[in-house]
Amino acid sequence: MKTYKGFNKDMTCRGFQYEVGEDYETNDAQVCSSGFHACEMPLEVFQYYKPSDSVYCEVIQDGKISKSDEGTKIASSKIHIGIRLSIAELVKAQISFVFDRIKNLKEESSAATSGNWSSAATSGNGSSAAASGEESSAATSGNGSSAATSGNGSSAATSGYGSSAATSGYWSSAATSGNWSSAATSGDWSSAATSGYWSSAATSGNGSSAAASGEESSAATYNRNGIALACGKNAIAKGVVGSYIVLTEWNDNADELLLAKMIRIDGKKYKADTWYILENEEIKEVIR
């Protein structure tokens, strides 16, 4: 089966070295215990490998298969490492995943629409919504839910643990709430926002913006003139040369904002492809 896998930037995962185009095999496969792990839902990889600090590949899993009771994580005894994917390509894959999921859903709720100014909404764990067309919208509520839209001016919103939202198209937006939630957009002037512990936001497109709020959250922008906002205790942000990042510092209880600073990634004083955090009123590089 085709799935998606995240790696460290050197193509390692839990100390094991992988290479694009190679095949690997082991004796057993148990989720969270043994075998090669990947996710059926493209954006679920953000829960394990955060944007801007990782690389992602399309993979094929075979042999012995073990599936998680929560989410779409799969362990297998065989794996083929396919092509490397950009964030924008992951977003497109997420949209395709949602549409395919809707076609096959039986017990889980789903909604799909097509056409300009269309909208879709669902509620329930594992629910999904997809809308295509200019100024379309999709919204879901429930743990593990997902929403995806395609079309200029489109928007997607989800709520619930492990939820995800993805959009593609100019002026598109994605928003999620819930721990481990993720939001990603592709398209010029697009925006992504998340709230919840360990949440992540990533955008691809000129003038795009990403905002993540919640402890240990992360925000990343991949384009010049883009903005990434990390709002939460120990939150981090990252950008490319020409982009801006906003960092915040909070009190020990994480209920009072002490300071906020914005910097421009110039490639000299502040480096591209590097996480930054605000600590003790100083902007510091995060070593990983």
Image (cartoon, rainbow, N blue to C red):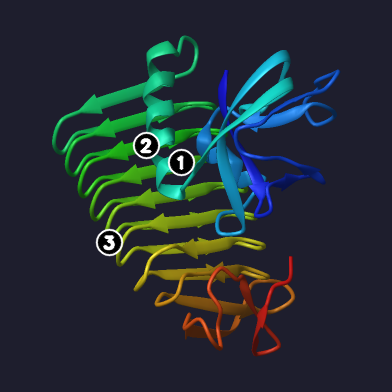
Query: What kind of residue is marked 1?
Result: Leu
In the image, taking residue 90 as reference, residue 75 lies left or right, namely right
Q: Are marks 2 and 3 in contact (CB under 8 Å)?
A: no
Q: Secondary structure at mark 2?
A: strand
Query: What kind of residue is marked 3?
Result: Trp
Q: How far apart, in angstroms, are the residues tagged by discs 2 and 3?
A: 17 Å
Label located before the other in sequence (2 or 3): 2
Percent of width and height locating residue 43: 52, 40
Instruction: Locate residue 128: give its quadrant.
Output: top left
The answer to whether residue 161 is seen in the rendering is no
Percent of width and height locating residue 210: 43, 62
Which residue is under mark 1? 90
Q: Are marks 1 and 2 in contact (CB under 8 Å)?
A: no
- Within 10 angstroms of label 3, few (less than 14), some, or many (20 or more) residues? many
Position of the C terminus by quadrant: bottom right
Which residue is under mark 2? 148
Which residue is under mark 3? 189
Give whichever of 11, 69 is nearer the camera. Answer: 11
Q: How far apart, in angstroms, are the residues tagged by discs 1 and 2?
A: 12 Å
